[in-house]
Amino acid sequence: MTDPATILQIIGSAIGLVRQIKQVEGAERAFEELEKLTAIMKAVSSGVMSSLDVEQARKEIDRLVVKLMRHEELQKGEADVDAALAKKFAKEDDR
Amino acid sequence: MRKTIPVVILVVLAAACGGAQKRQQTDAVHGALVTAAAAASTAYDLYAVWNHALEMGIVDKATSAEDGRAKLAAHRARAGSVVAAFEATGEALRVARAALATTDPDIGKVTQLVTEALHAVLALQQAISSLKGAEP
């Protein structure tokens, strides 16, 4: 089986992240994501997963893989910042 | 015939027990994979919020467009290791998920892949911590 020490370390890190969320402004999205995943984790820990739970878990993992690989939010954030910088110094650039 | 029936029953029971055990193992591995995905997703969302606030701070403090662009470029070069770690974690999750989705997954192999995905999450969290420590 997967190394229990590693799993415990990950769960500890996840708890640390939840504590961090409470201190970060504008992290509502992280909360929503975590609640969804916590529901799946509860289904997993309650015993044998139903085929519906398994299917839901697989769909969530697929969605998260795309999210991590494409990192669209990060790219959008950078584009917003570039636009803010351009706006701040618009007159300077015109000169 | 009379002798073969109990033997057949025993074989079927043994197969059923083995199947139940394998199912439990598969569920446990699924659980570990979802845990890894949950931790990576939360790290991503928090990082996006933190990174945006930091970059907007650079814009606020910039003394010229050139100064702002240079400081943003320097930050984004440092942040490249985190973006690479997100991609590596996504790839590790994808590979483990694909191995788990086969009709008769090799538990040993899948467990190894899920463990690699868990380690990728730890490396990701380390990359984020290092970046936070490296920011001026």
Image (cartoon, coloured by chain):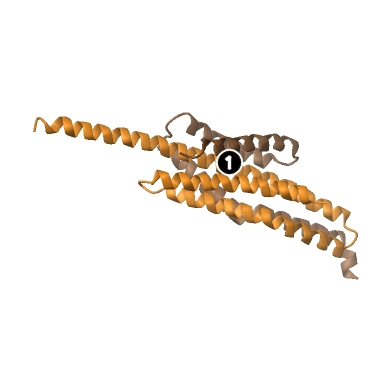
Image-based side of A37 in relation to B24, left or right: right
| Nearer to me, A73 or B7 | B7
- The amino acid sitting under disc 1 is Ala
Mark 1 belongs to chain: B
The answer to whether residue B2 is visible is yes
Crowding around mark 1 (Cα neighbors within 10 Å: few <14, some 14 to 19, many 20+) is many
Figure check: B113 above or below A31 = below
Q: In which quarter of the image is residue A48?
A: top left
Residue A75: percent from left, percent from top = 68, 57
Total tally of numbered discs in the picture:
1
Is residue A54 rendered to the left or right of residue A24?
Answer: left
Q: Name the residue under label 1.
A: B38
Would you say residue B100 is visible in this rendering?
no
- As drawn, A50 above or below B107: above
Q: Residue at x 75, y 50 (%)?
A: B52
| In the displayed structure image, the side of residue B3 where residue B39 appears, left or right | right
Chain shown in orange: B
Answer left or right for B68 relative to A18. right
Q: Position of residue A47 (x, y in %)?
A: 44, 29
* Quadrant in which residue B26 is drawn: top left
Image-quadrant location for residue A8:
top right
Q: Which of A5 and A53 is in front in this view?
A: A5
Colour assignment, chain A: brown
Pick the front one: A88 or A3: A3
Name the residue at 52% across, 31% down: A42
In percent of width and height, residue A23 lies at 75, 36
Q: Is mark 1 on a helix, strand or loop?
A: helix
* Residue sitting farthest toward the bottom: A95
Q: Looking at the figure, which quarter contains the N terminus of chain B?
A: top left
Q: Which residue is drawn at 65% across and 44% down?
A: B43
Q: Residue furthest left?
A: B1
Q: Which residue is drawn at 74% across and 39% down?
A: A24
